[in-house]
Amino acid sequence: MLADLARVDDELRKAVESDDAMLTEIAGHLIRAGGKRIRPGFTIAAAAVTAGEPGPSSHDVVLGGVSVELVHLGSLYHDDVMDEAETRRTVESVNHRWGNLKAILGGDFLLAKASEIAASLGTEVAGLLAATIGRLCEGQVRELRSTFDPGRTEAAYLASVSGKTAALLAAAGRIGGIVAGHPRSTIDRLTTFGHEYGVAFQIVDDVLDVVATDEQLGKPAGNDLVQGVYTLPTIRALATPEGDGLRRLLGPDLDRAAVLEARRAIVRSGAVASAIGTARAYLDGALEAIAPLEGTPGYVALRGAADYLVASIPAVPAALGD
């Protein structure tokens, strides 16, 4: 698995080479910064869920992983422009270093390269990746439409998460299954695993924004509140007795003191513990989907990803410090 991920990194660097040196540098910026490569890892693991013994992935499987990672990276370029981010993966963000226009073009170039690679893997993979890019956009638009809306519902939140986060993880597993030639029932199980894992992943990330420190996150805690993105812990807190006080705090131009008090109210409400319970339920659904594949190298890798996510779930603090 690690050797295959190293091959993914090699192919990523090759994929973003351009005749224009600046475009090559811009497109390769976050590739050089590294990353967990969760999505290509899912593609590689999915391809191995019918294998009896561990072995190297085929070149097409590696390329499938490269295509989903390029989509992920391209979406990060665009996200950082929208969020006016200054850093990403501990390095200067592309938009902060080269400006918004070059960052948008760099993101577009990554999406184009992803589509080119997907097309080389067949029409089904190409169509799936194109549809997934569309779902990413839909999920992001759903989120933007509910910015600073304290009436955002759980259904609206989950619809956004299903698009902007879970869709690509579902596609990563599905592409691995398609390229490996798995039975349709197995491909569907891998797709369900990716989707359920993706929702859990986003909920955990949203919980961390409430309870983690700036140092743990590598960015200011409570940034979702500042951006007006009211996630599951906030939505549930607004429905508790703490909701009235929290609602008065929310809105544009929050200072750091207001952000801290809002985070404290969310923790006091019990909504963090409730959201964690929901994340665990989605993870249980993910593992249930692939239970019939137990015993294969791919299952072991996917189960390891789920266990890693469980280990990252924070303990619910009694209170937040300054």
Image (cartoon, grey):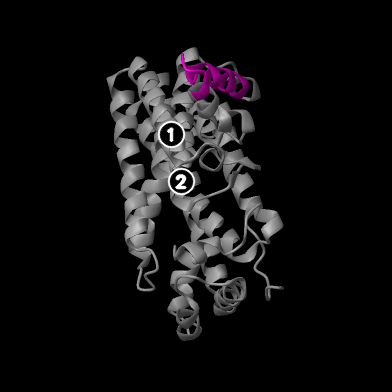
Which amino acid type corresponds to the residue marked 2 in the rendered image?
A: Val
Q: Which segment did they paint magenta?
A: 5-22
Q: Amino acid at mark 1?
A: Gly
Crowd band around label 2 with a 10 angstrom C-alpha radius: few (<14), some (14–19), many (20+): many
Numbered disc 2: secondary structure: helix
Q: Is residue 17 magenta?
A: yes
Image position of 32 (left or right of 231): right
Q: Is residue 208 magenta?
A: no
Q: Position of residue 120 (x, y in %)?
A: 36, 15
C-alpha separation, residue under disc 1 versus residue under disc 2: 10 Å
Q: Residue 181: tell me if it is visible.
A: no
Which image quarter is the N terminus in?
top right
Q: How many marks?
A: 2
Residue 240 in picture, x, y percent from top left = 47, 81
Residue at the spot 55% in from the left edge and 56% down from the top edge: 204
Quarter of the image for the C terminus: give it: bottom right
Near-viewer residue (87 or 190): 87
Q: Report the predominant secondary structure element of the magenta stretch.
A: helix
- Whether residues under marks 1 and 2 lie with C-beta atoms below 8 angstroms apart, the answer is yes
Dot 1 crowding, Cα within 10 Å, few <14, some 14–19, many 20+? many
- In the drawing, what numbered circle is on residue 81? 2
Residue depicted at x 52% and y 69%: 274
